């Protein structure tokens, strides 16, 4: 029988309390309460965990809640999100989000007013609390990650590859607008015309010119390393991480065109341009560079 030291369990509970307060909820939701656990309750949890096979407070609490509501954890999570993510004014679930106002909208909100102002209104993913058009990219990534693995490389590693003699193909999956703010040079070291801008949404459109262009690129360069580049997130106080669009594009590229030597740039163009601001072409040509603006350059 495994027992947990009281000091350990107190630390874990305190961590659970802090975690509950700091969960990333960018929008206020009604009915949320902070978790407060007194010393007596901590002591009972300490004792009870010692009699269970749970290895963490999170796992222990989940089991208690599953037993309490007679539902699996994923079902409980869905129900909780659906009931908590509601409009404070109309008490209805959010279905849209105005990106310009950074405001989630329910069916009774004046969505048309936002559209009339020319705002960017998108569908709202309740799980990830982000806007999307055709489908939530984070949901799509989670689905594909279960079967297709695409490794990441860091901005430093990409710079190392650019400075080497390795022949590569770079697929920049950003939109034309993002591309117009600046991109990798089309000629660098021994690589010439190796960078292609093919926005991620073209991967599904087999009759589009961009898709035919991609077919030709993969046919002529199937043995080279393919590096996928997306925009990357800009978050204050944090380094750019992740590569959702490039991962989805890369996974489909791997499965549809049998490209096996393929990687994604972690942090995307934002991460690379932040670190290597001089390795750029057509900077600000099609619009103000959001990366430089964000970092005050």
Image (spheres, rainbow, N blue to C red):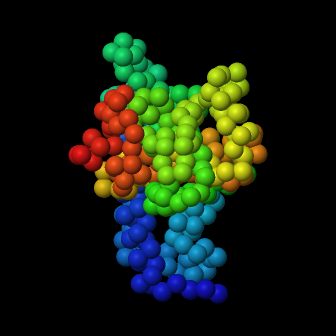
| Residue 108 shows in this picture | yes
View extreme (front): residue: 190
Residue 123 location in percent, x, y? 50, 28
Residue at 55 percent across and 48 percent down: it is 191
Q: In this view, does 75 lie to the left or right of 278?
A: right
Q: In this view, does 56 lie above or below 165?
A: below
**Which residue occupies the foreground of this view, 238 or 195?**
195
Residue at 40 percent across and 39 percent down: it is 281
Q: In this view, does 43 lie above or below 148?
A: below
**Which residue occupies the foreground of this view, 31 or 93?**
93
Split into 4 quadrants, where in the image is the N terminus?
bottom right
Residue at 35 percent across and 37 percent down: it is 283
Q: Is residue 181 left or right of residue 256?
A: left
Residue 2 location in percent, x, y? 61, 86
Residue at 34 percent across and 49 percent down: it is 278
Residue 35 location in percent, x, y? 39, 60
- What is the total number of numbered labels drawn onto the structure image? 0
| Residue 104 shows in this picture | no
Residue 248 location in percent, x, y? 62, 42
**Which residue occupies the foreground of this view, 101 or 259?**
259
């Amino acid at each position: 029988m495994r027992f947990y030291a009281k000091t350990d369990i107190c630390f874990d509970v305190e961590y659970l309390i802090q975690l509950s307060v700091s969960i990333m909820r960018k929008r206020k939701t009604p009915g949320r309460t902070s978790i407060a656990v007194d010393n007596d309750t901590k002591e009972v949890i300490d004792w009870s965990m010692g009699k269970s096979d749970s290895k963490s407070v999170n796992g222990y609490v989940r089991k208690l809640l599953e037993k309490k509501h007679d539902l699996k954890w994923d079902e409980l999570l869905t129900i909780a999100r659906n009931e908590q993510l509601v409009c404070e004014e109309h008490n209805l679930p959010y279905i849209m989000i105005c990106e310009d106002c950074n405001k989630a909208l329910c069916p009774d909100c004046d969505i048309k007013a936002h559209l009339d102002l020319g705002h960017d209104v998108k569908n709202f993913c309740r799980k990830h609390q982000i806007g999307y058009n055709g489908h939530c990219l984070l949901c799509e990534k989670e689905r594909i990650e279960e079967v297709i693995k695409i490794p990441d490389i860091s901005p430093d590693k990409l710079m190392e590859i650019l400075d080497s003699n390795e022949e590569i193909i770079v697929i920049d999956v950003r939109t034309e607008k993002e591309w117009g703010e600046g991109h990798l040079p089309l000629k660098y070291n021994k690589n010439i015309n190796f960078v292609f801008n093919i926005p991620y949404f073209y991967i599904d459109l087999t009759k589009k010119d961009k898709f035919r262009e991609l077919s030709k690129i993969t046919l002529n360069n199937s043995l080279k390393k393919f590096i996928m580049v997306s925009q990357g997130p800009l978050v204050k106080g944090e380094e750019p991480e992740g590569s959702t669009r490039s991962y989805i594009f890369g996974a489909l590229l791997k499965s549809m065109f049998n490209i096996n030597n393929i990687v994604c740039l972690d942090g995307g163009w934002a991460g690379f341009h932040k670190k290597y601001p001089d390795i750029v072409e057509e900077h600000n040509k099609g619009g103000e560079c959001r990366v430089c603006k964000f970092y005050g350059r």
